[in-house]
Amino acid sequence: MMGKVGVLFKIYAEEGKEEEVEKNIASELKPNGIQLDDIGFGIRVIKALFIHEDSEGSGSIEEKLRKISGVREVEVEEETLI
């Protein structure tokens, strides 16, 4: 039985481009939720939530995130069945 999966990505942008990258992710990939967090020492990270069918996998979303201009690093923070 397949279900829905929620994947929370942590995206690090090039310094000073966090807002621009956040807007690009929101417009190009339409995440279910997105926010910009201060994690300390002047470091800001974008967190984006995507919900998809279990059969789709999250690899293609991660690849698309990496291709967005200004993205430095992408990591999966949490992945869970919904």
Image: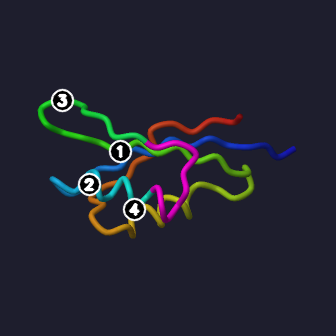
Which region of the structure is painted magenta? 26-34
| First reached walking from the N terminus: tag 2 or tag 1 | 2
Quarter of the figure with residue 43: top left
Residue under circle 4? 24
| First reached walking from the N terminus: tag 3 or tag 4 | 4
| First reached walking from the N terminus: tag 4 or tag 1 | 4
The amino acid beneath tag 2 is Ala
The mark lying in front, picked from 4 and 2, is 4
* Distance of label 4 from label 2 (alpha carbons): 11 Å
Secondary structure category for the residue under label 3: strand
The amino acid beneath tag 1 is Ile
Secondary structure category for the residue under label 2: strand
The mark lying in front, picked from 4 and 1, is 4
Residue under circle 3? 40
Tell me if residue 30 is in the magenta stretch. yes
| First reached walking from the N terminus: tag 1 or tag 3 | 3
Secondary structure category for the residue under label 4: helix
| First reached walking from the N terminus: tag 3 or tag 2 | 2
Residue under circle 2? 13
The amino acid beneath tag 3 is Gly
Image mark for residue 46: 1
Q: Is 24 on the left-hand or right-hand side of 27?
A: left
Compared to residue 67, the image places residue 43 above or below, namely above
Q: In the rendering, at what x and y percent does residue 7 appear? A: 56, 43
* Distance of label 3 from label 4 (alpha carbons): 24 Å
Q: In the rendering, at what x and y percent does residue 28 appear? A: 49, 65
